């Protein structure tokens, strides 16, 4: 299964006002694992950047002045996303800009939806967490994903965070750190050779701390699986 996690930054909010893409970040997932392939470009929008957008991403007109135009990377972009599932947070926004750019680059490029399947993680989050905040920062907090480096928005960084959020929302275990640490002072790390001093099979009961740690882990799994943790259901 090939998936592409994608994000963009723009000069403003509306293509109707001539706003353009200034950054694209996209990461490839193969069978729910990062493959190491990515596409990342800063782009010259050939126009000014709105003050509100500049506050969000910090990309200046001067910085972008020597970067390629979208048309120069359009073919590479299409080839990168072709026949994949595109994972985008608030997909209508990014798709609107991408299709606008593709239309200006040339009719032969078509639209994004002609090349790839679209999965909107904002829709997925709203289904899983109705009535709650579901922006990327809120989801990172909910799924215990470190976004402390996100002082400003950036397409590649946001794609990386979205990949972790998506894996946590859609599978759970891959983002929950289920392996025990090697801290031998923590619960769950006691050494045990399987036998007591008389050579009989020993029964080692979980401590209170271990039971609490186990229960917290089940709660984490239940949260990311939409309330489908079977172990918790057995305890009811």
Image (cartoon, helix red, strand yellow):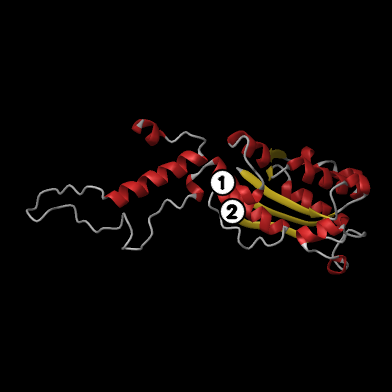
Taking the spot 50% from the left edge, 40% from the top edge, the residue there is: 223
Label 2 crowd bin: few (<14), some (14–19), many (20+), radius 10 Å: some
Helix, strand, or loop for circle 2? strand
Q: Nearer the viewer, residue 215 or 158?
A: 215
From the image, which quarter does the N terminus lie in? top right
Q: Tell me where residue 50 appears, x and y as whole percent.
A: 87, 57
Q: Which label sits on residue 167?
A: 1
Q: Which label sits on residue 26?
A: none
Taking the spot 38% from the left edge, 59% from the top edge, the residue there is: 181
The number of discs equals 2
Q: Is residue 162 above or below residue 61?
A: above
Taking the spot 68% from the left edge, 62% from the top edge, the residue there is: 151
Q: Tell me where residue 145 appears, x and y as whole percent.
A: 56, 54
Residue lying at the far left in this picture: please name it: 198
Q: Is residue 62 above or below residue 171?
A: below
The reply to whether residue 119 is visible in this rendering is yes
Taking the spot 36% from the left edge, 46% from the top edge, the residue there is: 214
The answer to which image quadrant residue 160 occupies is bottom right
Q: Sequence order check: which comes first, mark 1 or mark 2? A: 2
| Left or right position of 82 against 33 | right
Q: Tell me where residue 95 appears, x and y as whole percent.
A: 79, 43
Q: Tell me where residue 147 appears, x and y as whole percent.
A: 60, 58
The answer to which image quadrant residue 157 occupies is bottom right
Mark 1 or mark 2, whichever is nearer to me:
1
For marks 1 and 2, give the CA distance. 11 Å
The reply to whether residue 29 is visible in this rendering is no
Helix, strand, or loop for circle 1? helix
Q: Which label sits on residue 34?
A: 2
């Amino acid at each position: 299964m090939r998936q592409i996690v994608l994000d963009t930054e723009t000069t403003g909010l509306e293509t109707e006002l001539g706003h353009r893409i200034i950054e694209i970040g996209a990461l490839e997932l193969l069978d729910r694992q990062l493959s190491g392939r990515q596409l990342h470009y800063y782009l010259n929008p050939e126009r000014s950047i709105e003050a509100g957008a500049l506050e969000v991403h910090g990309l200046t007109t001067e910085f972008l002045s020597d970067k390629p135009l979208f048309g120069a990377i359009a073919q590479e972009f299409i080839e990168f996303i072709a026949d994949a599932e595109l994972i985008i947070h608030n997909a209508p926004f990014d798709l609107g800009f991408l299709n606008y750019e593709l239309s200006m680059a040339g009719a032969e490029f078509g639209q994004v939806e002609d090349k790839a399947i679209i999965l909107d993680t904002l829709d997925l989050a709203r289904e899983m967490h109705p009535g709650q905040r579901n922006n990327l920062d809120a989801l990172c907090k909910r799924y215990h994903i470190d976004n402390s480096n996100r002082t400003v928005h950036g397409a590649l960084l946001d794609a990386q965070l979205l990949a972790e959020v998506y894996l946590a929302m859609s599978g759970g275990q891959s983002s929950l750190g289920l392996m025990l640490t090697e801290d031998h002072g923590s619960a769950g790390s006691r050494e045990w050779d399987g036998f007591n001093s008389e050579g009989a099979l020993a029964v080692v009961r979980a401590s209170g701390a271990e039971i609490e740690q186990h229960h917290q882990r089940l709660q984490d799994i239940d949260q990311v699986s939409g309330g489908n943790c079977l172990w918790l259901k057995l305890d009811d």
